[in-house]
Image (cartoon, grey):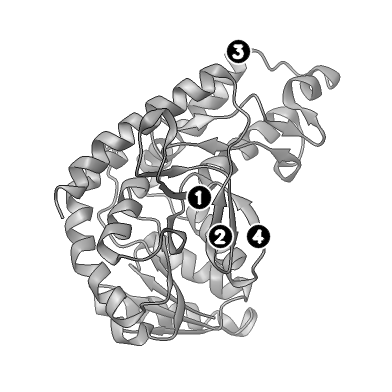
Amino acid sequence: MQIGIIGTGMVGAAAAFALASEGSAEKLILIDANKERAIAEAMDISHATPFTFGAKVIAGDYKDLSEAGIIFITAGANQKPGETRLDLLEKNVAIFKSIIPEVVKYAPNAILVIAANPVDIMTEVTLKLSGFPKNRVFGTGTVLDSARFRSILGRHLGVSPKSIHANVIGEHGDSEVLLWSSAVAGTSCVERFAKECDVVLDDVIKGSIDNEVRNAAYTIIKGKGSTYYGIAAATQYILSSIISDKHAILTVSSHHDEGIGGHNNICYSMPSIVSKNGVERALMPSMCDSERQALEKSAATLAEYTEKALAML
């Protein structure tokens, strides 16, 4: 399958390299407002393909997307130290107003996967600008946040993060919700597992893990300017799930006609089945009362800013 990548900054380039290395994509088309940057990234990644799976990597224009089955959109303003993802809203809505019509013109049947922040709101903006069915427009959501949760929790429990099943839902941002009540290590809930292994997992430790997950991006941005490896790996896994029709359950951000807490017609992350058709369906996870209340607050935040974003169109 051919994949278009719009935006060849650190996230777009890292995602392109991950996809070229993984081997499921037949061809990658890199597009950027800075054409020279796109050409340079395509060249650099192409020079690595003799050591990987040999995907063709080119720099192109929107017209080159006519055979692309997936368009990954990461173009937009970068989050700066001290900025929240919501601070990027006005700048990125303006950028998407120029990008999405071109994508629709040349790739009317593609699946659109959004990574630009604030990703939940930009996914809803893309849905409105494109007119595509909602299964074919979704964001990377909290797939990375869930991976951070599993990584940090696995480190604390002393087990592989691949043996941890724990999800983050809601906004990809400050109001995200860590689902402790359904977190599992192996086949046991994490509390039982921790007790059996003599590992402390009390409210103080949970709070520390929650803080590390929730603020990971801020810590990374402060240290090196931007995050890209984690989201590149998350993107590669999402896109390969589409290409291979895996029916993987991933916490992507998609449109909900009837949202939580009465906040309807917004995008947020829930465990969802992802296949060659895009998002097959979103699933309702088990939640305790406090988690549900936190999700309702997250949805309220997204509803407020989504309304502002749609008013800019």
- Position of the N terminus by quadrant: bottom right
Residue 164 vertical position relative to residue 98 in the rendered view, above or below: above
**Which residue is outermost to the top?**
203
Q: Amino acid at mark 1?
A: Val
Q: Quadrant of residue 303?
A: top left
Q: Amino acid at mark 2?
A: Ile
Query: Would you say 99 lies left or right of 227 here?
Result: left
Q: Residue at 19%, 68% (x, y): give it.
A: 98
CB atoms at circles 1 and 2 under 8 Å apart? yes
The numbered dot on residue 203 is: 3
Q: Assess disc 1: are there few (<14), some (14-19) or many (≥20) residues with their C-alpha within 10 Å of its C-alpha.
A: many
Q: Position of residue 158 (x, y in %)?
A: 76, 32
Please identify, in this view, whether the residue under mark 4 or under mark 1 is nearer the observer: 4
Q: Amino acid at mark 4?
A: His
The numbered dot on residue 247 is: 4
Between 305 and 28, the one lying in front of the other is 305
CB atoms at circles 2 and 4 under 8 Å apart? no
Q: For numbered disc 2, what is the local secondary structure?
A: helix
Residue that label 1 marks: 252
Q: Considering only order in the chain, which callout, 3 or 4, is on the residue closer to the N terminus?
A: 3
Q: Residue at 44%, 64% (x, y): give it.
A: 136
Q: Assess disc 3: are there few (<14), some (14-19) or many (≥20) residues with their C-alpha within 10 Å of its C-alpha.
A: few
Please identify, in this view, whether the residue under mark 2 or under mark 3 is nearer the observer: 2
Residue 246 vertical position relative to residue 2 in the rendered view, above or below: above
**Which residue is outermost to the right?**
196
Q: Position of residue 113 (x, y in %)?
A: 43, 62
Q: Considering only order in the chain, which callout, 4 or 2, is on the residue closer to the N terminus?
A: 2
The Cα–Cα distance between marks 1 and 2, rounded to whole angstroms, is: 9 Å
Please identify, in this view, whether the residue under mark 2 or under mark 4 is nearer the observer: 4
Q: Position of residue 42 (x, y in %)?
A: 41, 80
The Cα–Cα distance between marks 4 and 3, rounded to whole angstroms, is: 35 Å
Residue that label 2 marks: 238
